[in-house]
């Protein structure tokens, strides 16, 4: 038997032949525009307040049609742009799709406002009807959230003003960052590094390099600190002003709603993490001694202690993933095989491609596409498994009503992290020598440190900052002070030198679309580890249960999801402790191997 040779480029012609010049795609865009228009019109014609049996079912059909067509179009354009950043026509198509999406969103806002106008008793009867029953959760949620906002006219005004008054600040941030560069002496010559290039140097083996880059890094962000502070203050000020008008007092309200989780769950998750810092501090101390220093500084956190020499060709990586997915379940393995064979993956290493990786779905075709650049490292294998996990999540939801398919950021990473963990543990088990094993362990632990310490610092800072911002502008000096205090707390005082300008260097604090772009990462990581623990206990039987869990991710709260599928209570310490314990196990192994 000869080994499989999978193509490293994807097939997009299956959807619309001809790339960014595709006639079929232009026809599709026209169709989507008509569908959005027809959806819009059906809402306008619908007298929600007075009618008994409303035309809601028909409106939702139109919603669904426009939604799926739009997603198909967005995915296609994302793939075109990613595979060739110089594709000018693809950029033009992006403009068209963005304006269609904006039209669609406005229509959805009108629908939500119409839902609020329906009388409570009429509403109850309405959603008990057979064809709407399965949408019970999402429809109630939309109606409740719309009710907590201001009037249609006021919300429309806010949306209009937000273009320059809110989202404009995010663009301002990008503009400031694009002008920033970090001077660095290399081979006697001074060069100017972009933010991304400088960041890469922070994981250099050479401590002198890291230190020099970091000094310049802090200095460069410091020079822009006044501009960044003004940007952050205005951006958050707008957000808080809107909250105040809507009478939302808790700064976390929107973020929690969006992630469909309770405050209790969030609090208990952080409590368990805070109570378990000790092993991670021991890891950082061990890392310091392995690097030959007294105490780690911020710029040492990403420095590698070991180096994995093992290379994986694309074909080896693919077989490795399929084989170890198979140890968990046959459906996941077969799915991955189909993705490799069907050219769902763009992995070729060539110039002109966008950096990074993603997975996107084509709902009208029942397929996904994965984008990445593969260069034979274990990290690449891990990324590939991660993205295949996302694709499997979509596959698991294939028969679910499209309205029930929208899951939040905190569960979005469940299937991907799960797939990554399956592969990481297999690689660990098969490691040929201590060096390779140590490198794999280190990479797993670094991930835990990022999610349990770094993200924790971001969350502590952001909640405290928003509270202070309620009282007025927060000065640059105070921002630095708050950031450093949050880092000290999150890293349990284990570092020598911190990164006070982190509030400026981290883009996530400036994202206007999603508030608190931090705790959902940590939630997703530990939630996925909780599922992993169940999978280990139950063996191959577990796969079908896993699929049913994924199916439900878009139609219930996370507490309901955990209760139904894991028998777990997310508001209790036990579940979170089990996840953190798995991370601690890796640390203990690392400590005993490096004694
Ligand atoms: Zn992901």
Image (tube, rainbow, N blue to C red):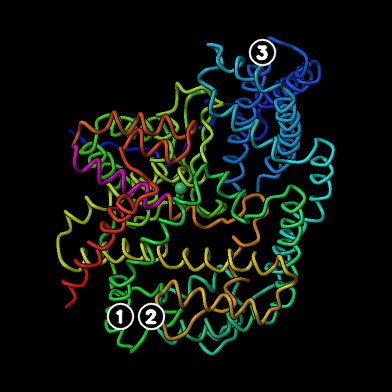
Element on which disc 1 rests = helix
Residue at x 77% of width, y 23% of height = 40
- Which residue lies under the disc numbered 1? 285
Element on which disc 3 rests = helix
- Residue 588 position in % (x across, y down): 21, 67
Q: Is residue 26 above or below residue 438?
A: above
Rate crowding at label 2 as few (under 14), some (14 to 19) or many (20 or more) other CA atoms within 10 Å. some
CB-based contact (under 8 Å), mark 2 and mark 3 = no
- Residue 532 position in % (x across, y down): 28, 45
- Which residue lies under the disc numbered 2? 494
Real-space Cα separation, disc 2 to disc 3, in angstroms: 59 Å
- Residue 117 position in % (x across, y down): 75, 25
CB-based contact (under 8 Å), mark 2 and mark 1 = yes
Give the magenta range: 524-538
Q: Which quarter of the rendering shows the C terminus?
A: bottom left
Between 397 and 19, the one lying in front of the other is 397
Rate crowding at label 1 as few (under 14), some (14 to 19) or many (20 or more) other CA atoms within 10 Å. some
Between 261 and 173, the one lying in front of the other is 261
Real-space Cα separation, disc 3 to disc 1, in angstroms: 62 Å
Q: Quadrant of residue 396?
A: top left
Real-space Cα separation, disc 2 to disc 1, in angstroms: 8 Å
| Magenta highlight on residue 68 | no
Q: Quadrant of residue 3?
A: top left
Between 594 and 210, the one lying in front of the other is 594
């Amino acid at each position: 038997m000869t080994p499989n040779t999978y193509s490293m480029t994807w097939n997009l012609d299956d959807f619309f032949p001809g790339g960014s010049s595709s006639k079929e795609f232009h026809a599709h865009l026209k169709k989507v525009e008509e569908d959005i228009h027809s959806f819009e019109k059906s809402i306008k014609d619908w007298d929600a307040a007075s009618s008994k049996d409303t035309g809601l079912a028909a409106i939702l059909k139109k919603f669904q049609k426009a939604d799926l067509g739009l997603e198909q179009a967005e995915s296609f354009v994302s793939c075109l742009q990613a595979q060739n950043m110089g594709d000018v026509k693809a950029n033009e198509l992006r403009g068209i799709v963005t304006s269609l999406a904006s039209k669609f969103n406005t229509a959805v806002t009108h629908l939500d406002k119409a839902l609020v106008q329906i009388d409570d008793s009429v509403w109850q009867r309405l959603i008990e009807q057979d064809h709407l029953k399965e949408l019970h959760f999402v429809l109630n949620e939309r109606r409740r959230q719309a009710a907590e906002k201001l009037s249609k006219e006021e919300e429309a005004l806010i949306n209009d003003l937000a273009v320059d008054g809110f989202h404009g600040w995010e663009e301002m941030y990008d503009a400031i960052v694009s002008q920033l560069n970090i001077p660095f002496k290399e081979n006697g010559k001074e060069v100017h590094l972009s933010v991304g290039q400088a960041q890469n140097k922070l994981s250099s083996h050479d401590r002198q390099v890291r230190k020099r880059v970091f000094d310049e890094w802090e200095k460069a962000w410091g020079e822009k600190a006044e501009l960044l502070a003004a940007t952050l203050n205005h951006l958050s000020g707008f957000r808080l002003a809107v909250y105040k008008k809507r009478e939302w007092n808790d700064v976390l309200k929107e973020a929690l709603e969006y992630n469909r989780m309770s405050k209790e769950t969030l609090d208990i998750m952080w409590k368990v993490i805070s109570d378990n810092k000790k092993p991670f501090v021991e890891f950082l101390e061990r890392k310091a001694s392995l690097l030959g220093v007294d105490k780690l500084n911020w710029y040492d956190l990403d420095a590698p202690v070991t180096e994995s020499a093992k290379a994986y060709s694309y074909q080896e990586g693919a077989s490795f993933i399929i084989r170890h997915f198979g140890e968990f379940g046959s459906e996941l393995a077969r799915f991955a095989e189909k993705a490799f064979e069907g050219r769902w993956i763009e992995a070729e290493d060539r110039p002109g491609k966008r950096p990074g990786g993603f997975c996107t779905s084509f709902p009208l075709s029942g397929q996904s596409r994965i984008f990445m650049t593969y260069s034979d490292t274990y990290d690449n294998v891990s990324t590939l498994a991660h993205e295949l996990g996302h694709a499997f999540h979509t596959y698991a939801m294939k028969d679910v009503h499209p309205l029930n398919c929208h899951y939040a950021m905190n569960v979005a990473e469940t299937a991907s992290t799960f797939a990554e963990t399956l592969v990481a543990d297999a690689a660990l088990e098969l490691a040929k020598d201590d060096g390779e094993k140590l490198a794999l362990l280190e990479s797993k632990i670094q991930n835990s440190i990022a999610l349990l310490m770094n993200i924790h610092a971001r969350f502590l800072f952001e909640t405290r900052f928003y509270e202070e911002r309620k009282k007025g502008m927060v000065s640059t000096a105070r921002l630095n002070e708050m950031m450093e205090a949050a880092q000290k707390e999150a890293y349990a005082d284990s570092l020598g030198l911190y990164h006070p300008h982190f509030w400026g260097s981290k883009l996530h604090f400036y994202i206007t679309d999603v508030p608190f772009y931090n705790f959902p990462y940590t939630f997703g990581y530990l939630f996925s580890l909780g599922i992993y623990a169940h999978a280990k206990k139950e063996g191959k039987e577990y796969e079908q249960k896993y699929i049913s869990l994924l199916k439900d991710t878009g139609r219930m709260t996370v507490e309901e999801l955990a209760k139904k599928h894991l028998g777990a209570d997310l508001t209790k310490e036990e579940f979170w402790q089990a996840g953190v314990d798995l991370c601690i196990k890796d640390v203990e192994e690392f400590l005993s191997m490096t004694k």
